[in-house]
Amino acid sequence: MSSTPGTPSDPSGSTAASTPTASDLHLPAGTTGRGNYETIIDPGARDGWAHTGLRVLALGPGESEIFTANSVEAMIVPLNGGCEVSVGGEQYTLRGRADVFASATDVLYVPVGSQPTISSADGGRFAVATAVATGIHPVALIRAEDVSVEIRGGGNMTRMVRNFGTVGAFDAMDSLIACEVITPGGNWSSYPAHKHDESVDDGEHRESELEEIYYYEIQDAPDGGPGFGFHQTTSSGESTPIDVLSEVRSGDTVLVPHGWHGPCAAAPGHDMYYLNVMAGPDPVRAWNITDHPEQTWVRGTWADAGIDPRLEGETR
């Protein structure tokens, strides 16, 4: 089966062409999928969404899928299971993992215009994070042991970030920024709330204009019951109203075209995972944020609170 993402109608235009509603931005598991894809979000395929995309591919044992990277660059991220990717006449093995909570994973970058074939002998689920791009960069295999792991926050705001595709961690690409975050049950992340919805460089402060995708997986209860968490996005200006407070479950996606986003809260007993995908219209790939002024003070509490012991020893 072959599948082609849409070409953005105006990749240099505003990400807030119309006022989105909560139902536009919180996409429950399975509601955007077709064929072997559980989730399909393509840049330019919906109003006010121009730069980023995400597809979640589910393959049974022995199945394969061709992905055509029209106008986008991509990173292939195994969520559970491993896969082989054939692209440009070469084959790459992504060893994968049991699930997103187990460890970092091998990741493959593929450039704009490529046509990788993803296949899995044992089956699995694979995220394809995309961003509009024009420059062509080499295919790159990033091994799990080479992924930078960062601990952010302190106390019940401690979370772990796997920086496989962030600025400074991997830069051989045009516009895509991607990482994954583990928030232990009962903790808060994306906190303080922050924004990156305008380009600012006034000599004292910088901010980058970036769309952002949050793709969630939540750890089940010991008896198998589904876990849950919460995501919040609020308006950063009168011209861009937005008000989202959603209960999120495994497989849900939340789009952030603009606004203060965070905090994200993991229900006690249910570790939370999210994959972040970002890109925007700025000519230079950068991730510069502005904290919500009412919440930035919490950063000053982290040192005294210490690292949540569930995440001690994870940094590399």
Image (tube, rainbow, N blue to C red):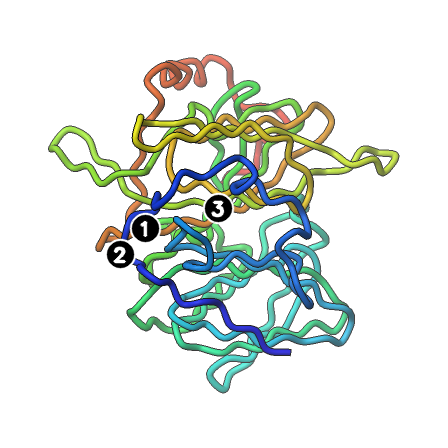
User: Do the residues bearing badges 2 and 3 touch, measured as CB atoms within 8 Å?
Assistant: no
Residue plotted at (51% across, 30% down): 244
Q: Is residue 316 visible?
A: no
Residue plotted at (55% across, 27% down): 245
SS at badge 3: strand
Q: Which residue is mark 1?
A: 280
Q: Looking at the picture, does residue 131 appear above or below residue 236?
A: below
Density class for disc 1 (Cα within 10 Å; few <14, some 14-19, many ≥20) is many
Q: Which residue is mark 2?
A: 12
- Disc on the earlier residue, 1 or 3: 3
- Disc on the earlier residue, 2 or 3: 2
Using the rendered view, name the quadrant where residue 81 is placed. Answer: bottom right
SS at badge 2: loop
Density class for disc 2 (Cα within 10 Å; few <14, some 14-19, many ≥20) is some
Disc 1 from disc 3: Cα separation: 12 Å
Q: Locate residue 264 relative to residue 83 in the image: left or right.
A: left
Q: Nearer the viewer, mark 1 or mark 2?
A: 2
Disc 1 from disc 2: Cα separation: 8 Å
Relative image position of residue 272 (x, y in whole percent): 63, 35
SS at badge 1: loop
Density class for disc 3 (Cα within 10 Å; few <14, some 14-19, many ≥20) is many
Q: Nearer the viewer, mark 2 or mark 3?
A: 2
Circle on res. 213: 3
Disc 2 from disc 3: Cα separation: 18 Å
Q: Name, please, the residue furthest toward the left.
A: 203
Q: Locate residue 222 relative to residue 280 in the image: left or right.
A: right
